[in-house]
């Protein structure tokens, strides 16, 4: 119900930012799957902190230890548990904060929900650090999808108002790979440099910026998803809003479609050169009625600016119920949107694999005369 | 998995637009709850078609028949099944469409998913008509919430680019009621008239428009929700994307926050006159880390323009795999965004009640020394 | 959570014994399935009351009305809702009972759970009458299984201590059909007559008797099920204990195995004439580690004697907290075990189909190199 | 779906018998709960192997390491992950077995289900070793229940046909504690010695025996549970059949009730000295209609004889499809029923706590006027 998602493929996060470890338990993985540990590490490295001046100085090697579920490099059918030990923990940075909730963080709400018993250091269980095991889980799902010709890719579509070029109508696997190899995940590198300048600028001012991530998945069969609350949009939304700092999600033309006419927004059906039915445009983001149309899945998520900033902020003392001025020392990212790009890809892969597993049961049953 | 949502309070939709009936099964309602049938009908009437020239001419009285779950006007603890018979069905309008999927409708994706066995008439199970029983279910949830001082309200925030005034920082129950009583659900009636003019204009051109709905909930306790994938945002998102035509969702500042600095977006904590901790602004939409902060819940959904338009559109023949030009006769709404306003309220109420029911188990257990 | 079961195939019961109707909502049925309504009615007729002197005199035609999910005799992929109206309702028989809970019925526990708001007439939602829509749901599942060569059959293994012959090691479809056609569902008719004599005897004494049902399923693939809490035993148990009056369940040798030596109980593996691996005996009931072995699934359920008896019984007045002597008028069955036979078959079919649907997603994913 | 159970309190097992570790992830625990680690270890020690000649010689200290969810000895609201490293692993004992499935073990079914990719050493994920983390999880649940006055206890009711005295009508907490402190968990020690003699005898003959466990829970409120498939029986059954070797389950009079008359089996309601409504006998095992009556919960589970025996057994070569004679070396228990006693208690506590958490949401909502 809380730190888990998925129906047939179940992913559960655990751990606290300044506890012993963070980790993930994955149930329902098919058996006999070769896990490419190197590729997995590469995905996790894209998210890893401490690599460059654009992100937090906390240094974590983020090397998972597999406690179960893998034998000889392949899944063995039993639940996979992977653990990432916390190494560079400086909890003292956070001690003063226990009584003074940081604005836009979950300190206050976690305090209320768990009646003061939460491990609040560094955000505790609600820390962005939990996206490390999340990447790991989604990364394995992505490897399974890729072997079926389904690819997931994302880029930083905007930072602080500077926009990257959007994905083309039919993005390719090669484009996804190209972006994934870049240190800063954009399509147009000139725009990328402008974005980085804005991040550096915000950092210099002890402030932070947000961003927008555009994500696509190609190779999906048409007919995936279920009506109403079991649709692809619903399932993706339920998982994507679990990534810390995500505050908005739109599919295809999304909020723009609200200002369009039906005649503009409706994607005309066509028969393409290979005789396949597809649509001429993709305002629907590849989903109609919650079900995939065979066009690329396309959506955008809004990432709010990193809550941790160096500037003094107004808060309260929880114990005294008095105003306080808070200046956060610690280490923090002036922007987390670029580091969230592989996380969005990973979550998307996990949701899609789960839905494909369900869809297959559908398919096999549906062939009956 | 498909047409249902909720954990302790479970809501399942059934029925097809041109079948015998549409309906809803509600499991987990507390027993002994007085259901105000008149208020319920009023909510459903706000959604009902055929009332005015801005919506479809299909006339359905939408009077539910309760098959179970209610005795003497009160819930009896057993699952509540309510059925709304379809009366004004003109399936002949749709017959020609079976081979020619309507652009931006789910005709094609439903055809693929169910291998040609779907009841495609009028959208079948994927029709907007299913929002009638959905309103009913959410309406009952809303009545239970109201008796606990929790109120849900929504208004049409934009149509075709014309924007209504936004909700104030602390919207009142009275404002919600005032909007609910209007024929056209906006705060600023002048803007509302402009919106209606745009709808009429689009209708005259055999076209359609979309819109944005802003929804708020007040009176929620702080501490509601669960980390990561069990958060209020996740649960609402999973349900709201089940409303046909919803293509985007943002909480608080949402996509705007992506272009803000942390110093602007972070809501400062304050102690208010009553000694309560709250925030000065509400860019977080009342949710931090997936958990309610005690500030009003605030979000916006994007509704795409009605797919059914009178203008000729490009489609294909499914059987012949050839292009076709389609002109949809039938009856359709030039805009559905205003009719979707009570649906968004209802779904929100249903999700919140479900989460409150879970939260309470939390609460009671948490008090232990 | 309550009146529903299943993961991909979801079955939800609703209705009250003396309300307007009882019914079932089935989600997740594959599309395009021909439903043999006549065979379905035959299954339901095996359960139906009022046919003979061995069961209650309440006469209900039990003809379901399908509100959704079927078009032209085939499933259309949308949730199937079927309603059975209550016709022969004599609530007056139950009025006096509202304050005096009937021993061994759920009157008292329902009263406490729903704080006096339950519809207690005739057991309300907890009545055995709910097994009519349950039969219907399981009957459809059984038809789908049969087309895949999977057959489910059951017989009355014991009544009041008189035992029928057990199923042979490898029961056949023909044996299942033969039993299903009998008015009294036993293998050995001589024993069946003895059982009926006991029932008649108990009825004459205004008393009731219980029984044991043995159920088998053949044609199941090996490898179905999941470890620990997702096993076939777990899933069947969770559903079977939902049949009113079931108080025990054992697989294979069950309780007898507790008194056996390992050397006796362990089923030796053999290679049969067709080169298939199977076991020489079936003390495991076709399940090892929660997973099917390919041998017939075999289990037994204990049905307690019908709680409603004509003899005076000791109870209390809920309002006065005083002892009362209760004599139940009304109409009741001296035995329900024989009427429960098709219900056990139906529930088994529903659980197995659900697990097969899950297993298939497994299968398709597992084939990867 | 597979190695997990629970709705609000979720328990997921992971690990393999001869892998790095076994463990458990517990989601939904209330925050601020003091975990008595010493008492927890005592419970786990009751299950631990290698203590005496009646169980396997494998020596495992079974000391859990908590990776998350606990801060300063109290739950912190985040998922609790506990890991038990495997220390005394001798996989060589099992190597020869990979091609020759052990009768009555899950070797063959796991092989089929996971297409040869399962980690079969020592039963892999399906090993009884997974009951160590299961005990841990249930033990924490039991501590929470005990602080609310709800106690769970069990004893070995029968071994190889020798029966212990049954629980009295109203078992006490003191009786539960007394049994828990015994090396061999019976009420009547004379009978216990006879049972142990039988186990020793079977061991001497390189054979094994099974047993029956009787379990009770006291202090449960009336009104807990949900109709049909959400009942206490259903929820307990779904979890209890997840304990390896459990092949039967009966509540109250169970299978015996099938041979009783209604007039004997029906528990008469009475008003006791304290003015509480209870029943004079407890043939229902404390449950009517799936809902607790306030009487002690009472059930029995059948444990089959340990499949691993030293005697030669008939099996097959999976690769050659030929008969083989198998003699299992390795270390094994001549009886596991006595070691399963704390496991049954633990699982029962976990299920009851989960249901109480749900029931509370019920309660709070139900008080409305």
Image (cartoon, coloured by chain):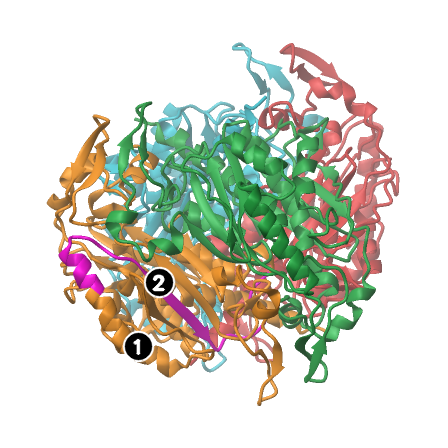
Chain colours: A green, B orange, C cyan, D red
Lateral position of residue A325 relative to residue D360, left or right: right
Badge 1 vs badge 2, beta-carbon distance below 8 Å? no
Pinpoint residue A103: horizontal percent, then vertical percent.
Answer: 64, 71
Look at mark 1 in the image and give the residue it sits on: B188
Residue D239 visible to the viewer: no
Q: Is residue D51 visible?
A: yes
Chain for mark 2?
B
Crowdedness near tag 1: few (<14), some (14–19) or many (≥20) residues, C-alpha within 10 Å: some
Is residue C49 positioned above or below C35 on the image? below
Judging depth in this view, the residue of C311 and A60 nearest the camera is A60
Q: Nearer the viewer, residue C184 or A304?
A: A304
Q: Quadrant of residue B174?
A: bottom left
Estimate how packed mark 2 is, as few (under 14), some (14 to 19) or many (20 or more) residues with alpha carbons within 10 Å: many
**Quadrant of the rendered image containing residue C35:** top left
Question: In what element is the residue under mark 2?
Answer: strand
Is residue C353 rendered to the left or right of residue B102?
A: right
Front residue of A17/D244: it is A17
Residue range of the region highlighted in magenta in the rendering: B198-226
**Quadrant in the picture for the C terminus of chain B:** bottom right
Are discs 1 and 2 located on one and the same chain? Answer: yes
Residue B131, given in percent of the width and then of the height, sits at 30, 58
Give how far across and how far down residue A128 sits, in percent.
Answer: 66, 55
Percent across and percent down for residue D17 are 76, 35
> Disc 1 to disc 2, how far (Cα)?
15 Å
Look at 53% across and 40% down and name the residue there: A187
Q: Nearer the viewer, residue C41 or B180?
A: B180
* N-term-proximal mark, 1 vs 2: 1
Q: Which residue is mark 2?
A: B212
Label placed on residue B108: none
Q: Chain ID for label 1?
A: B
């Amino acid at each position: 119900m809380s730190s888990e998602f998925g129906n047939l493929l179940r992913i559960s996060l655990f751990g606290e930012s300044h506890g012993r470890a963070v980790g993930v338990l994955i149930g329902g993985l098919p058996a006999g799957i070769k896990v490419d540990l190197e590729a997995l590490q590469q995905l996790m490295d894209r998210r890893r902190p401490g690599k460059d001046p654009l992100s937090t100085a906390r240094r974590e090697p983020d090397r998972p230890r597999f406690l179960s579920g893998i034998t000889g490099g392949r899944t063995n059918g039993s639940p996979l548990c992977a653990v990432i030990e916390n190494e560079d923990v400086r909890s003292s940075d956070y001690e003063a904060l226990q009584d003074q909730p940081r604005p836009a963080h979950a300190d206050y709400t976690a305090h209320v929900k768990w009646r003061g018993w939460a491990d609040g250091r560094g955000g505790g269980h609600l820390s962005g650090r939990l996206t490390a095991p999340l990447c790991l889980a989604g990364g394995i799902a992505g490897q399974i999808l890729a072997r079926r010709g389904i690819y997931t890719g994302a880029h930083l579509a905007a930072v602080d108002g500077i926009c990257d070029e959007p994905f083309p109508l039919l993005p390719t696997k090669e484009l996804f790979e190209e972006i994934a190899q870049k240190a800063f995940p954009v399509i147009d590198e000139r725009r990328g440099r402008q974005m980085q300048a804005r991040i550096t600028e915000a950092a210099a001012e002890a402030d932070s910026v947000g961003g927008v991530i555009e994500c696509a998945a190609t190779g999906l069969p048409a007919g995936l998803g279920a009506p109403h609350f079991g649709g692809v949009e619903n399932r993706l939304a339920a998982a994507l809003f679990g990534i810390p700092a995500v505050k908005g999600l739109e599919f295809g033309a999304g909020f723009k479609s609200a200002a369009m006419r039906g005649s503009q927004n409706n994607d005309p059906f066509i028969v393409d050169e290979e005789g396949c039915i597809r649509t001429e445009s993709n305002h629907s983001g590849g989903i109609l009625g919650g079900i995939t149309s065979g066009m690329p899945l396309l959506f955008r998520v809004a990432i709010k600016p990193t809550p941790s900033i160096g500037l003094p902020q107004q808060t309260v003392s929880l114990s005294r119920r008095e105003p306080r001025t808070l200046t956060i020392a610690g280490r923090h990212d002036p922007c987390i949107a670029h580091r969230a790009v592989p996380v969005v890809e990973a979550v998307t892969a996990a949701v899609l694999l789960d839905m494909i597993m369900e869809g297959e049961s559908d398919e096999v049953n549906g062939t009956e005369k």
